Amino acid sequence: MQAFEVSGTIDPTGRLILDQPLQVSHPGRIRLIVLLEETDHHPATNQPTSTHDSSFSQPATLQVAFDPNAIPIWELAAQITASVPAEEWAKLPPDLAQNFDYYQSLRDDS
């Protein structure tokens, strides 16, 4: 997987317009993560007051390495749950997974 760091603008219809074309070897579908700058907005146009950050103008390749020695996520979850005493597990309602939103709303109301 390659990653490119570029800048662009979101137009009023929500479409992304890049400042520069991506330099890719082949066209195709992409996964996109959008990071919005925290800037002051002009109240009349709702547009950012700062326009362009030159630090985002050059594409960068992101290398994500697989660590074969890393503990799998399910084993980490098992380690964490094993540290919870049985009497604490007994306090959970038996239908918690099925009715999580309901129980969460009870917690939020308190």
Image (tube, rainbow, N blue to C red):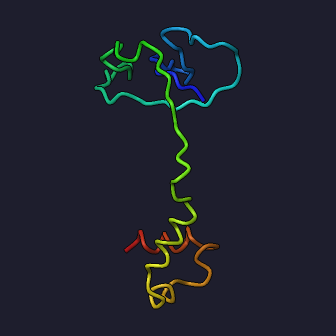
Residue at 55 percent across and 66 percent down: it is 75
Residue 32 sits above or below residue 47 on the image: below
Question: Camera-side residue: 13 or 60?
Answer: 60
Residue 12 sits above or below residue 64 on the image: above
Residue 60 relative to residue 22: left or right: left
So how many labels did they put on this image?
A: 0
**In this view, which residue lies farthest toward the top?**
20
Residue at 51 percent across and 31 percent down: it is 63
Residue 89 relative to residue 42: left or right: right
Question: Camera-side residue: 82 or 94?
Answer: 82
Q: Residue 11: horizontal and vertical position, in percent?
A: 51, 18
Residue at 30 percent across and 16 percent down: it is 50
Position of the C terminus by quadrant: bottom left
Q: Quadrant of residue 58?
A: top left
**In this view, which residue lies farthest toward the front?**
69
Question: Camera-side residue: 63 or 49?
Answer: 63
Q: Residue 33: horizontal and vertical position, in percent?
A: 52, 32
Q: Residue 7: horizontal and vertical position, in percent?
A: 44, 17
Residue 64 sits above or below residue 15 on the image: below
Position of the N terminus by quadrant: top right
Q: Residue 49: horizontal and vertical position, in percent?
A: 30, 17
Residue at 58 percent across and 77 percent down: it is 96
